[in-house]
Amino acid sequence: MEFRGLTGGIYRLTEWIMRLSGTNILWVICSLPFLFIVYMRLAIQPEFVNEALTLNWALGILAPVTLFPATSAMFTVVRKWVMGEPDVKIMRTFFRGYKDNYKQSLVGGIFYTILFVVMYVDITVYMVQFRNLQLFGILMLILMILLFVSLFNFFSMVTHYHMKIGGILKNAILLTLLRPFRVFSTLLGAVAVLYIGWRMPVLYFFFAGSIMAWFAFFNFYATFLKMQEQAKKREEEQTSDTESELIDLGKEKKEK
């Protein structure tokens, strides 16, 4: 039964609310150990350095094991929505994506976590202990932001391509550098969602992750289609050039 007018609009809105909230809740549940440590780190300030260090180590260990696979699973669901399958079964698609992409997400998570830790330590050292070298700290901060932004492409590529993890990591970073506009518009959207969530924390549980994932894959897929179109045009131009050469050769042969 299809609803029209205002009733149809309200019905479709409630459908999307259920899709976004259901996917986000699954992501929160699967990422719960990591998110709980994040909450402890931010909301309950550790009194001793050792406590803070322990929480940081816990974050570094839990991120590849829980956060990355859960986020890949969430991107698996939103990929279906962006590609025109809004009525996909959320729970089945989520856990299928979780299972299928777990290994690549784990390896990618370890790679990104190590880089983030190294950059965080470098920024802390340059900005706090060696104030005359703060320029290097700022440079490292910019690289850290670029690395964070490339995560959007990483999760999109894990769910969209059949590719080895090395190729995914390399292309995720390259795509961030070569196509910065789309990716940084995703970053601005993510910052806006996080800011709204900061004002209304309940949105983190129901909507924040799935909205950011949807917007990130939407931008990635638009970039993918544009690159595909450009590649097709180049292929057609090469074919046209080859045909022209064959025609010219045919004319020369007749003249001879």
Image (cartoon, helix red, strand yellow):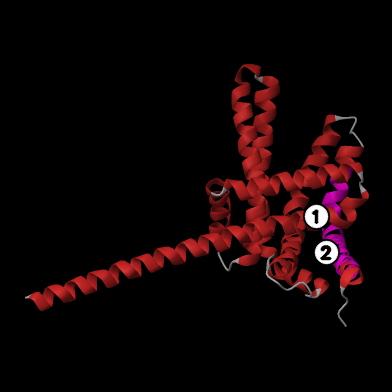
Question: For the residues marked 1 and 2, what is the alpha-carbon distance in whole angstroms?
Answer: 9 Å
- Between residues 239 and 247, which one lies in front from this camera angle? 247
Instruction: Give the mark nearest the N terminus, 1 or 2.
Output: 2
Verify whether residue 191 appears in magenta: no
Quickly name the residue at label 2.
Answer: 23
Q: Residue furthest bottom?
A: 1
Segment colored magenta: 10-39
Residue 110, x across and y down, in percent: 66, 51
Q: Residue furthest left?
A: 256
Quickly name the residue at label 1.
Answer: 209
User: In the rendered view, would you say 143 is above or below 79?
Assistant: above
Q: Residue furthest front?
A: 5
Tell me, yes or no, whether the two marked residues, 1 and 2, touch with CB atoms within 8 Å: yes
Any part of residue 99 in sight: yes
Identify the image quadrant of residue 248. Answer: bottom left
Q: Which mark is residue 54?
A: none
Residue at horizontal 37 percent and vertical 65 percent from the top: 237
